[in-house]
Image: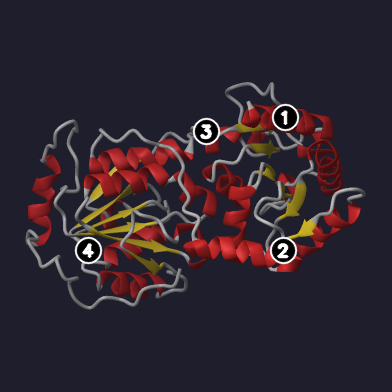
Amino acid sequence: MSNHPPDDGRRAGHGGSTAGGDRGFVRSRHRRHPGRRCMIVPGDIDRLLLIAPTWIGDTIMASGFFRAARTACPSAEITLAASPNLMPIVEGSPWFDRIESFQPSGMLGPVSTGRRLGRTRPDATVLLPGSFRSALTAWWTRAPIRIGTRRDGRRSLLTHAIPDADRSRPVPAVEHYMRIAHAAFGEGHTDTSLALTITPHDEKTASSAIGLDASTPLLLLVPGANREDKRWPAERFAVVADTLFREHGLVPIVAGAPSESELTRSIVDAMRDAPGVDGPSVGLDLHGLKAVAGRAKLAVSNDTGPRHIAAAAGTPVVSLFGPTDHRWTILPGCLERRLLAEPFLPEDTMADQAPNLCHIGRITVEDVLEASRALLAARTD
């Protein structure tokens, strides 16, 4: 998805029945709609700006929030501000009318980015990131309504600061984003299911990269992560791939970022039976990964973004958790087996606080194979 150029004026059809100034909008927070409690954003708003989370997984887990925004404001022009790495993920979504780049880096980044986004003349800006920088950027959009969580000294930059969740215990990201949705758009929104739009371009990119017929049964392997301690041992992925190829004929696609090419190549080289495809070496980007995830019969993934892509695409996922608490990223309505390095951790202890006890190497190959077989059987039942 390419970024749309900034709009210096109002879009045709959104000519401006906008209340003047902050004050009129503050009154509108008490407007009631059938089946909803008080909402901050009026349902008949003209232009709405949403600022996406930073990470791929979080953006997918915010599906319920985005759905609520479109449902609550059906005639609004909705602009999503997202970092460039998220563009392939949100492309083709039915919830947004336009997408703008969000890169408030550097000392003046929030000023320049906020002013550029402000050219869309948003009547309200709702931000999902929790950083001070994102709130400062929202302030520079000059939207009369600016909604976000109350944290990191951001309260003065927002017209409506929502109390943040108690983070002394894991709060699922899906639940966190829905709290913002309920404050902004009313409490009648309950659909938290994940969503992902796979476009014809995604399909074409995947076919060109992996060189396999669309009917080939695939196994998606995701051995990378943004931290070394979140990565299950590479050689074990190869054993899983060989076993599932022998038992189910699944052709493994090993996905990863270009910076993970050494890791993915080592896994493909370690396979004895399976004809593995090394994603980075064949140019499998995020566009292609979306389509591969949608085609795959099963995904085996560390706790990283492609796990969420596969789950949102409707693919069964075996998710591997070491010293990151799985309760932060519970995925509703997905066919998933979460394997924990320490499944008997006390409820009041987070895996993030027990890195030795929750070493990801404690998850065995047989654990993964057992979960994989169960998911494959469930899919064919």
Residue displayed at 52% across by 65% down: 201
Report the Cα–Cα distance between label 2 and label 1: 29 Å
- Spatial CA span between label 4 and label 1: 47 Å
Quadrant assignment for the N terminus:
bottom left
**Which of the two discs, 2 and 3, sits closer to the camera?**
2
Q: Nearer the viewer, mark 3 or mark 4?
A: 4
Q: Dot 3: within a 10 Å radius of its alpha carbon, few (fewer than 14), some, or many (20 or more) residues?
A: some
Frontmost of labels 4 and 2 is 2
Closer to the eye: label 1 or 3: 1
Amino acid found under the numbered disc labelled 3: Pro
Q: Which residue is mark 3?
A: 170
Closer-to-camera residue (110/125) = 125
Q: Is residue 32 above or below residue 15?
A: above
Q: Secondary structure at mark 3?
A: loop
Q: Report the disc number at residue 211.
A: 2
Tell me the distance, in whole angstroms, between the alpha carbons under discs 3 and 4.
33 Å
Residue at image x 59%, y 46%? 310
